[in-house]
């Protein structure tokens, strides 16, 4: 995952919990998931549009 090992992922998770608090983490994950999903859909729709212009 992005060239990170498990120790780095654990440290990042601990820092995120300290900064945002355990109750805010699911909300942030949900927002990130929606953002990534929208980004993928937009990329796919642009790819479909460019393939149709042959």
Image (tube, grey):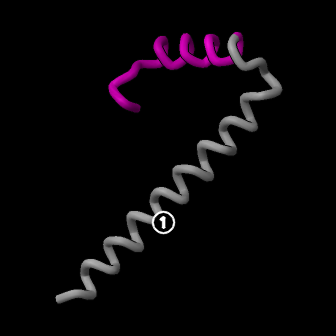
Find residue 38 and report its image quarter: bottom right
In the foreground, 19 or 10 = 19
Above or below, 1 against 51 in this view is above
The number of discs equals: 1
Look at 52% across and 50% down and name the residue there. Answer: 36
- Is residue 11 one of those drawn in magenta? yes
Left or right placement of residue 35 versus residue 39 in this view: right
Horizontal and vertical percent position of residue 30? 69, 44
Horizontal and vertical percent position of residue 18? 70, 10
In the foreground, 1 or 21 = 21
* Residue assigned mark 1: 41
The residue positioned farthest toward the left in the image shown: 54
- Is residue 4 one of those drawn in magenta? yes
Look at 47% across and 56% down and name the residue there. Answer: 39
Left or right placement of residue 9 versus residue 45 in this view: right
Number of residues whose C-alpha sits closer than 10 Å to that of mark 1, classed few (under 14), some (14–19) or many (20 or more): few
Find residue 51 and report its image quarter: bottom left
In the foreground, 49 or 13 = 49
Above or below, 51 against 20 in this view is below
Above or below, 23 against 6 in this view is below
Above or below, 45 against 28 in this view is below
Magenta region: which residues?
Answer: 1-18
Left or right placement of residue 28 versus residue 49 in this view: right
Horizontal and vertical percent position of residue 27? 75, 37
Look at 82% across and 26% down and name the residue there. Answer: 23
- The quarter of the image holding the C terminus is bottom left
Look at 26% across and 78% down and name the residue there. Answer: 50
The residue positioned farthest toward the right in the image shown: 23
């Amino acid at each position: 995952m992005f060239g990170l090992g498990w120790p780095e992922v654990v440290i990042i998770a601990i820092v995120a919990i300290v900064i945002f608090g355990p109750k805010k983490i699911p909300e942030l994950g949900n927002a990130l998931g929606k953002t990534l999903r929208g980004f993928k859909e937009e990329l796919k729709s642009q790819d479909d549009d460019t393939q149709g212009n042959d």
